[in-house]
Image (tube, rainbow, N blue to C red):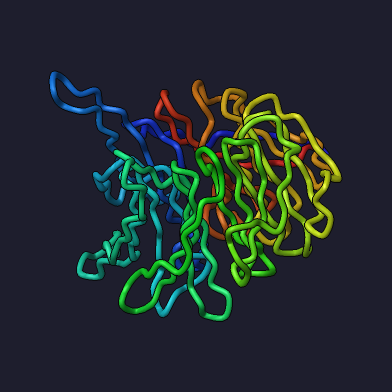
Amino acid sequence: MKMEVKTLISWDTEFSADSVEWCPVDKFQHVLVCGTYQLVEGEGQLRTSRQGRLHLLAFVEEQVIERLESLDMPAVLDCKWAPEVVRGRVLLAVANAVGEVCLFRLTQNTESKIPRERLVKETKMVLPKREDSQELLALSLDWSAAGGDVKIAVSDSQGCISVLRLDDSGFHIEHNWSAHQFESWTVHFDAFNPHICYTGGDDCKLRVYDLKSCLDTPCTTNSSHSAGVTSFSSSRNSEHALLSGSYDEQVRQWDTREMRRPINEQSVGGGVWRLRRQPRTEQLTLVACMYNGFCLLDQELSVVAEYKIHQSIAYGADWAHFTDAAKHFSHLTTAECVIGTCSFYDHKLCISSLIKND
């Protein structure tokens, strides 16, 4: 099955774009955020700084992206919505370049004639760093909300993982440990077991940790990747099914019960920065391939579509969560799925639709 990717609209993100995330909550599925990262060179005694901007956007009728607000902040490395409503709140977590995890709440301004969404900052946590370290970057994050026990796992530039517990008083560090010799590029909760964390580092290691056990030693260490491990996606439909991505340009498929070697792999022609399974069906996986644009893989990891409109490093990728695009937008058909992608130096965000070729 081959597919066509059709660009609906592109938008200038101003700063270099590295993450795009669609809100999964029913009422706000037209809302997305785009995180950016801009390196500002210092002059004289001034140090180089990493500045960022978080855009809150709405994809509305007539193929329009509406900017709801833009928040200046330290450079954004990753951001993710909570997968479900948390104590009545729609929450977004942001990992930034000064070692913070910031939490925002999505609200609606009901005083205007047309309600407009905006983000309100709730709290933040500064990650612990070594005493000899001048800087710490929070690199990636993932949510777990199993049984109402809300946690966020964060990876950082010193090779550490922190697990933060969120309650009504804010963030609390529940675990912090050294997982990798160099940068911990990614961390991911297992979709079926919230006590299991997968971590990937610049040391080319994939590691599995059980939060109920001693974290000094991983349950599993795999060295199949020939470059840094950068992304994971575990299945919500099939227990023990895991995908990993790496700078070595391979997407690997794993059975987590036996992780000595992958059960399948596919070269995508560029370093894999992000893996996103299609919501609900998981029939397709959206891949950000860095210097080779974006592609879509089927469940056998065959490439069914490529998207090369971006002219710079492909970093951000996500699926819109609505089940029937035609119910939301008259210019789309029922058969179409909608994705968001963004790229770095050309500071471009694109919203596109996927169409099956008969």
Q: Residue at x 43, y 55 (%)?
A: 31
On the image, the x and y values in percent for residue 291 come to 58, 23
Residue lying at 66% horizontally and 50% vertically, measured from the top left:
207
Q: Position of residue 177 (x, y in %)?
A: 50, 56
| Quadrant in the picture for residue 90 | bottom left
Is 95 left, or right, of 251 in this rendering? Answer: left
Q: Residue at x 38, y 30 (%)?
A: 16
* Left or right: where 332 falls relative to 71: right
**Residue at 69% in and 68% down:** 192
Q: Quadrant of residue 110?
A: bottom left
Q: From the viewer's side, name the closer residue of 237 and 8.
A: 237
On screen, residue 186 versus residue 42, left or right, reads right
Q: Residue 42 location, x and y as percent?
A: 20, 23
In depth, the one of 119 and 204 nearer the eye is 204
Residue nearer the viewer, 333 or 302:
302
Q: Is residue 140 above or below residue 38?
A: below
Q: Position of residue 174 (x, y in %)?
A: 45, 69
100 or 84, which is in the foreground? 100
Q: Quadrant of the N terminus?
A: top right
User: Which residue is most to the left?
Assistant: 44
Q: Quadrant of residue 189?
A: bottom right
- Residue 237 in view of the camera: yes
Whether residue 117 can be seen here: no
Q: Quadrant of the C terminus?
A: top right
**Where 100 sits versus 38, above or below?**
below
